[in-house]
Image (spheres, coloured by chain):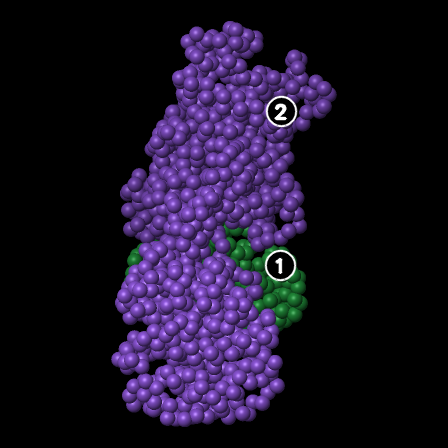
Amino acid sequence: MSDGAGATAPKPSSSVKLVLLGEAAVGKSSLVLRFVNNDFQPNKEPTIGAAFLTQKCQLPNRTIKFEIWDTAGQERFASLAPMYYRNAQSALVVYDITKPSSLVKAKHWVAELQRQASPGIVIALVGNKLDLCEDDNAEAEQADAENETEEEPSTARKVSTKEAKAYADEESLLFFETSAKTGHNVSEVFTAIANAIPETSLKGPRSGAGGGTQAAISAGQDNNRVNLNARGEAGPKEGCAC
Amino acid sequence: MFLQNLVQKAQQLIDPAVLPGPLGSLTSSDRPSKAQLFRHQFRLPDTQNPLYEITAELTLPGKSSRGGGGAPKNWDKSNWDRDRGTHYVGQLHLSEQFLCFSTVNTSFANTASTSASSAFTGRTHGTGPAGNGFTLPLCAVRRMERLHTQSYMFALSVTTWNGFDAGGEGKAGAPSPPKLTIQLEGSRQQCERFCDGLKRGLRQGIKEVDNMRTVAQECYSEYFMYDDFDVTPTPEKPDGTPRTPPDTGLGSVFKYPGNSKKLRDRSKMRLWHEYMKENGRNTTLVRQPDFHRLIRVGLPNLLRGEIWELSSGSFYLRLQKPKLYQETLVKHEGEGSLAIDEIEKDLNRSLPEYAGFQSEEGIGRLRRVLTAYSWINPEVGYCQAMNIVVAALLIYLSESQAFYVLSILCDRLLPGYYSTTMYGTLLDQRVFESLVEKTMPIIWDHLVKNDVQLSVVSLPWFLSLYINSMPLIFAFRVLDVFFLEGPKVLFQVGLAILRINGEELLDATDDGTFISVLKSYFARLGESAHPKSENPKHRAITNFQALMVVAFKEFEGITQHTISEQRSKHKGAVLENIESFAKRTSIRNLGPESKKLSMNDLGFLYDRFYTVLYERQQRSQIIQAEADRKQKQARQRASELVTGVPGNAPEMGRVALGPSSSQMDYDAFREFLAGVSKWAVTDSPSSPSKEDKSSNGYFASALRNRSASLSPWGAGPEPADHDFMQRLFKKWDADGNSALTLQNVVTGLAPIKGNRDIMSSIEYFFELYDDDSDGKVDREGILRISEALLFLSRRGVAGGLGPSSGVEEVKGPDGLPMSKDEQFLSAVSAFIRRCFEYADPDHPSRQDVDGAATGIKNLDVKEDDLLDLGEKKESDDHPLAENSTSAADDSVLARPSTNSFGQTASKNAEANAALDPSSPVHITLPTFRMLVLADETLESFFDSGFANSFHLADAPLPSSTLTSPSFLNLHNAAPSNSASPIPTISPGGPGAGVVAPGKGLRGMLDNIVTDGMRVAAEVKRRMDEAQKELDRGATTRGTEDEEDEEYEDHGRDLLDVAEADAVPERQGEAGGNLLDKDIVSSPTKAEAGSSAASVKSTGSTGMGKDVEKSTMFER
């Protein structure tokens, strides 16, 4: 439940609210599940409304505790989203690299966040399902029927890294391509976000505004927190790379 | 069922006290209609209406009679004794197909006040089969007899169909349920009326009997009650056919969740067997207090589905349309849709831990039910969470049963929950929060203080009916009560959860802890609530049982009434939120073109676009509803009212309520334009009073009642219909499907409003008329352009000169200021002439033209200088300048003559050559551009006037010009004539030249007009000679302009203007009329009546007037 580092050397700890947005079935919940429990389920129940999970990320000089809001992806749930991204300091906008339409939707989300979410929100654009195109460099050659399920390995990439990267640069987003199935790049995303959060905007866990200073107290508090995912008591092995 | 929905929706419109869905109407009353309350109380399909009602006493055979074996058989009219059995006093209701009784004393009669029908006292408060009683399909009545009685005038004995066993007098077969005895308590007349209605209904019901039997056979009770409880089921019927139990869901194959022993399933079955023996089953079930009790303790597996069907009312839907499910599947076999794609994504993720959904069988059922529903209700389609709910239903219900339950859920019990905007979900979250605030202020304050958002936690509870929050067995217990008592159960349970966990929740200071407290509570639902209690009985109480007690005892006060009240209270805010979100998203996604318009303008366009669609929909529905009502009245209480409004709910247009049409057809587009641009308002609104007079149709009376809302254009101005608008529509309709999306409108408008660049604006206009996009506009096109320019300017141009130009107003010959309209008119008349002067022949000899053009340009420059020096010149002078610059120096007095055709004799000859239809001509974009730029007025029009004529957010049209009914009325009704004191000036009046020229302004104007006309007349004559088909070119509105320059000059005194203008129209007199007649068409009149006949009218009422006018011209 608690990752060793927090107990031995209390570092400044702060919680960061992170929201996941993106089209349905791009793998938002799977990314979180991989990050939080280092697990993967091929048939995950769709998220209804939103799911809430927490996970810590150890940085050299501080601990970031992510409070992750994993939202439902279906279009009609979009109107619920403002409820979840309210006050979020960071966001993961996920698309499926085998589905160009999901990038379009991701762009909409980025626009929405930039306009409506808290100013200074750190946004990461994440192309998921990298495992579906083994050859990373092959760019959408096999133009065939797209698959939405993750078990189908046949589908090739439909969104080029270059295109997405260019967009991310233009909008100053962090950018990663990941595979929740293999775990590739997943923890890197969260670490990068943790690093990108300006220190000034950090606050102690639920202590209101101000810098993250109450190390000792919060460490104790954190240990009391229950990891919400019932199945995932095992604890994160490589939740964070650092 | 879908049809029934439509019918209901239509009926809701008729009843002013209507509640569309649960939400309450936005407009008038938040009260549901009586018919709706009636249907909800008895869970009837939407086709049913309360026809008769009467106070009555229901007598059931008491338990005592059960002992005396043959007791039921002794029940007949001879020895009926009202002292035996159980008595209930209540209200007996008759609908088209149902006889309903409830001890809850509610009235749905027409005379009853709405409060009398909504003041529920029973447990279900109007959302379920309240109180004790029955909902009896008339087709299930086997026999109905009138009993001899002393004390009551009317007593009826009802024998139901499954009171008799199918196999005759043998042992096996269902035991007879009791006959029901009903005494009617009312005046003789009342009773007779009721009985007459009943007789009719019963006769109708006979047709349904076979169908009813088939449907009932799918109920487990039919199988279950065949034998006594303790004997092994008879394997076959007396006739030898084998008896097989009906489909009771996946559970019968894959096991029902939970330990049936622990759930005491068998003893529950025994209790139900007893209950049904005495009180009937499926169609004929009578609700007594035990019914509610048996449901509260949890339904047994095999009967759960059937009781769900009965208490939710889906059974009655299935009874009405038993084949709908199969038919829907067959009809859409092989089709694909977005919903289906979404369903496919989730099939493997619906209750994946239940064995049935790891099998193809289970997945297949789930797929079919969800798909079928998405077809019958495409507005909802598929929403995540429906998969979970349906998966849960399928454990206890057959496919088709689950389908009907899902319909009831989406349409009635959870309205708006799964819609595309999920407004129902959001609304109920808001309601839930306010209930928490009300009932548990301490917890609420704590949540607020710690910024924990409750709905984040509770939303999945409601959306998936606790199915993915609680362990399945408990979620099903909640469902048992939910189907019986309605949506308020969800709230009660939710509140109870918070109350029970209150202390722990008060320790939680963030969302995470908050959620985890509840999660662990749900995991402990099966554990003892008092594990440390000495009393073994207390120890045996589980957390879940405690929860139910808190929910239904402590929160007993939460009734459907509470919920409805709260819903209407919060509805506005919730819808607004959704709408602003939708608007934001929609505007943001309009594409790059939209960036040319300001955010405000986009917002305005968005509002205007959806307002028009919404209002049109509303109007069409009111009209439709009106028609329906008439129809209904015509055939008194026809039981099958099948005409409905296709696909529309009363409020569908409201964005937040879900999908509706998001495309504009041409008519809607006209209306849209009329709200944005003055020129798009028609000059000859079809007078409502006229329609009133022709009161042959039923619309007439309707119009009298609600004329504002029933005019096809609502309260807004009636839009014009003009070639230009058609062209604009076509151009904006980029997808070519004769409908505009918001995207189309924005993309279409962006180049006009956004560029602010005269060249592109000219080009845009040119392209509108370049039909084959070959860069050339032919003769007809030129005429149409001129005509469009006049059309656009007939209410004045907000040109680049702007209001400030008043300082340097152009003076007319008589020293009166010349209005911009006049300038424009003359500019156009010059334009048309020049067009033909400089048109290229189709076999080009371009050099000359170019040369000439350059010449003109040079001269123009000169002249501009002159103009700057002092008095502004008629733009009309410009072309004349080419022969003698002295023209520019002419005094204003000289202008009429310089305008005349003769002065440019040499050019005229050229022009005439160009007019020769035998040598077709065209102008190219450069020529067009040149001609526009050669004229200051036109230049300013294209520079800004055209763009400014679309009033967006920056300067919306003053509402007075848009919606002034008095304006419309006066305009049409004004009886005065041209003798009106206000001199009516008519720029563009095509007939003006024929009429004896007036003095002053009028005279000057007439000259201008004459001048332009003569050019056009020449064109026309030759064209007519050459090609008949060019008739179309002379399109005319055949209408009068009610807003001439007086309109501008006299402070927009609409009434005056309307009055003044109405004159000529009414009387068909020549003076000051025909403002809208364009130059092109006028020569037609001047020429001969025959050509006038060729003028094609585009206005709806135009033709008649045209003819009238043309004769007038002949005179």
Distance between mark 1 and mark 2 Cα atoms: 46 Å
Q: Nearer the viewer, residue B627 or B477?
A: B627
Q: Kindly identify the residue that appears in the image at 61 percent across and 62 percent down.
A: A132
Mark 1 residue type: Asn
Q: How busy is the neighbourhood of tag 1: few (under 14 within 10 Å), some, or many (20 plus)?
A: some
Q: Which of B906 and B934 is in front in this view?
A: B906
Query: What chain letter is assigned to the residue under label 1?
Result: A
Q: Kindly identify the residue that appears in the image at 39 percent across and 64 percent down.
A: B1069
Q: Is residue B572 above or below residue B96?
A: below
Q: Can residue B550 be seen in this view?
A: no
Looking at the rendered structure, the secondary structure element under dot 2 is helix
Residue hosting label 2: B223
Q: Which of B146 and B69 is in front in this view?
A: B146
Count of numbered circles in the view: 2
Chain A colour in the picture: green
Q: Where is residue B1022 in the image (x, y as percent from the top left)?
A: 56, 77
Residue hosting label 1: A147
Query: What chain letter is assigned to the residue under label 2?
Result: B
Q: Where is residue B1108 in the image (x, y as percent from the top left)?
A: 46, 62
Mark 2 residue type: Tyr
Q: How busy is the neighbourhood of tag 2: few (under 14 within 10 Å), some, or many (20 plus)?
A: some
Q: Kindly identify the residue that appears in the image at 45 percent across and 65 percent down.
A: B1112
Chain B colour in the picture: purple
> Position of B223 compared to B687: left or right?
right
Q: Is residue B198 visible?
A: yes
Q: Where is residue B382 in the image (x, y as percent from the top left)?
A: 54, 49
- Same chain for marks 1 and 2? no
Looking at the rendered structure, the secondary structure element under dot 1 is loop
